[in-house]
Amino acid sequence: MHVVIMAGGRGVRLRPYTSTLPKPLVPIGDSYAILEIILHQLAAHGCSRVTLAINHLGSLIRAFVGDGSRFGLTVDYLEERTPLSTIGPLFGMRDRLPEQFLVMNGDVLTDLDYADLLAVHSRSGAPLTVATYRRSVKIDFGVLEAEGDKIVSFAEKPVLRYRVSMGVYGLSRRAIADYPEGLCFGFDELVLDLLRQGEPPASYDFEGFWLDIGRPEDYDEANSRFGEVESILLPAGVLAPT
């Protein structure tokens, strides 16, 4: 199993924590970096090779992860000279990728079974499989719909339920075959291109634990909850540093 981890973002929304550290290295629970947890998980799920796409403060990630041997992995690097968004880095490493592989963000905390996601993707025949999570958002206002100057519907403080991308994908190499190297290209653009081509992505619905560390409030939640979720996030035998 080959996994590409996007770890080159500047983490602007998570400042000031990311002023001196890249987001994948911010500490969780005073014991682990986010990326450290991810690498332990991938090794436990049978991953053998990881490519880290790095840019912002990438030298710190190189120094922390090294060749991956302490995680039981082989790790190599793709350094972005200019930001290439969430899919663009793949275009410069197509010859290093197997036919089916995983792509994920470097700031995700989840107990997702990565091996099962890749297996389901491989069987599906879809060019892209997106791990999705159900979220609910309560609207604190009365929501109405109008046609012209007439109100035609009203709901008092409704709860909206929808599925969101978890930032973890199964990808087939053919899905990225036709894009030029060096193109800045996002996951959203890939999904829209596939829909236009009549090749809809597949959904891998997940109901376990998932938290995207994108904003300071997410980071605070991750730290406050780490004690209760540590046992499901970390493989057996992985001990906190002393």
Image (cartoon, grey):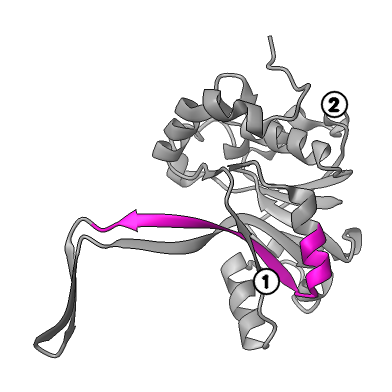
Which residue of the protein is positioned furthest toward the left in this rendering? Answer: 149
The numbered mark at residue 70 is: 2
Q: Which residue is mark 1?
A: 202
**Secondary element at tag 1:** strand
In terms of image quadrants, where is residue 221? top left
Q: Look at the image and say whether residue 131 sits in the magenta stretch.
A: yes
Secondary element under disc 2, as helix, strand or loop, is helix
- In the rendered structure, which amino acid carries the disc numbered 2? Arg
Relative to 209, say whether 230 is above or below: above
In the image, what residue occupies the spot 77% across and 54% down? 116
Q: Residue at x 67, y 71 (%)?
A: 202
Q: Residue at x 66, y 80 (%)?
A: 200
Q: Which residues are magenta?
A: 119-139
In the rendering, which numbered label is found on residue 166? none
Which percent across, then down, holds residue 68?
A: 84, 33
Q: Nearer the viewer, residue 178 or 237?
A: 237
Find the residue positioned furthest to the bottom: 148
Q: Can you give x and y, in whole percent of width and height, for residue 181 in the image? A: 77, 69
